[in-house]
Image (cartoon, rainbow, N blue to C red):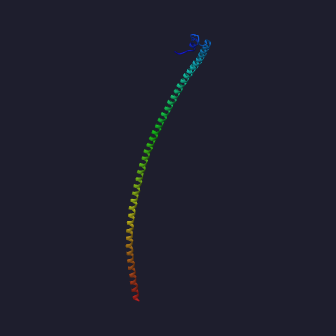
Amino acid sequence: MQLTPEMIREQRFKVKLSGFDKDEVTNFLIDIAEDLEELLEENNLLKSELESMKDKQKDLEDIFLSAKQFSDEKIQKAQEQGNTILAEAQQQAASLEEQAQLKIGEAENKCREILEEAQQKAHEVLEEAQRSKAALEQELVDLKAKRTSLISEIKSVLSSYQNWIREIGDVD
């Protein structure tokens, strides 16, 4: 059984010969009832405050959950954006790499063409040089032959002049 202040005030005790002072017991019971009333009021006030705090706690938990959910959504969106940006960057890198490979291939082809042209030109120049050398060698041979022929002619002319001079000298 739970005591109430009214129960304490209305409580009556039997009187015996050697009992307590009736007024003193009554005053004590009144004081206890008043203290109990204060305690019950304070208890009710504390319960009310506790309920208010529980409501505030629930509100704070709701706010926390909302903030956490908002934060989680932001984190997820940031991760998705990061993944999207990363995928785009990887795609761009792959595209740039592909373009670079194409340009490298084009440059290699151009280098091969230039090298082939240079080799062709070098071959043509070498052939022309060899033809020129052969022509010059032939010219040299012809010149040597002409020189030999001229020297022979000059010797022949000189010999005929010497003979003529001797003949002229013998005539006198």
- Of residue 125 and residue 116, the one placed in the foreground of this image is 116
Residue 2's place in the image compared with 73, above or below, is above
| Rendered view: 15 above or below 81 | above
Which residue of the protein is positioned furthest toward the bottom in this rendering?
172
Q: Does 115 sit left or right of 31 as displayed?
A: left
* Residue 15 in which image quadrant: top right
Q: Residue at x 40, y 83 (%)?
A: 162
In the picture, which quadrant includes the C terminus? bottom left
Residue occupying the point 40% across, 63% down: 129
Residue shown at the point (43%, 49%) measured from the top left: 104
Query: Residue at the location (46% across, 39% down)?
Result: 86
Q: Nearer the viewer, residue 24 or 87?
A: 24
Position of 1 with respect to 169 (left or right) is: right
Q: Looking at this view, is 163 or 56 the one in front?
A: 56
Tell me where residue 32 appears, x and y as whole percent. 59, 16
In the rendered image, residue 63, in percent from the top left (x then y), is placed at 53, 27
In the displayed structure image, the side of residue 159 where residue 33 appears, left or right: right
Residue closest to the far front: 18
Task: Name the one closer to the observer, 128 or 92.
Answer: 92
What percent of the width, then of the height, locates residue 27? 62, 14
Task: Give the mark count.
Answer: 0
